Amino acid sequence: MRYGTIAIVLAGLVLGGCGKEDEHDHGGHEGGGNVTVPDHYAEAVAKCDELCKKIGKLIADGHLADVHSAAADIKKIAEELPKIAKRDLSASVLRDVNVKSKELAGMFSEIDEAADAGKKADTEKLHARMKELVSGLVAHAAHVKEEEEDHDDHK
């Protein structure tokens, strides 16, 4: 199931025409994102990490106008992370996940505007903060509830 979800997401990125400037329209889909949000926390934050690395590559390659799609996908996943975390993570880390997820989702407009304006230095600064947040969220994947695996009799 996990590999199927990853394959679908990757196919969506390839077939979705990521980065075509003529499709870069902010009207009506401000931060919508086209990614399929993974069902499990570890997969969701891994996808955010992958998208964050993609943004880094786009910035390095000078494709600032193409940051929108990956940033929108991160926002979409980040908005769902608190709900996913409640199912998958121990209670001790939920507050931190909620705070970091909210901040990460809230960065979409700012990084998108900086990138669209061609402000590479500002985009890099915002991307650095995104990387910090994603890294913090990835670290919480180590706190996945083990009792979920041990108690499958709740079905």
Image: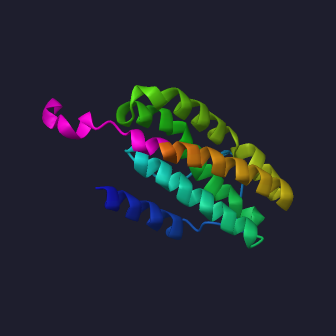
Tell me if I can see residue 119 in this picture: no
Above/below status of 110 relative to 20: above
Q: Is residue 19 left or right of residue 35?
A: right
Give residue 63's quadrant in the image: bottom right
Above/below status of 42 relative to 96: below
Q: Is residue 30 left or right of residue 145?
A: right
Residue at x 72% of width, y 52% of height: 128
Above/below status of 123 relative to 62: above
Examine the structure image and report whether residue 16 is included in the region drawn in magenta: no
Number of numbered tags placed on the structure image: 0
Q: Main secondary structure of the magenta part?
A: helix
Q: Which region of the structure is painted magenta?
A: 140-155
**Residue 28: x, y in percent?**
67, 44
Tell me if I can see residue 132 in this picture: yes
Q: Is residue 124 left or right of residue 42?
A: right
Q: Which quarter of the image is occupied by the C terminus?
A: top left
Above/below status of 42 relative to 152: below
**Residue 43: x, y in percent?**
42, 51
Residue at x 55% of width, y 31% of height: 96
Residue at x 47% of width, y 41% of height: 140
Residue extending farthest to the left is 153
In depth, the one of 35 and 127 nearer the eye is: 127
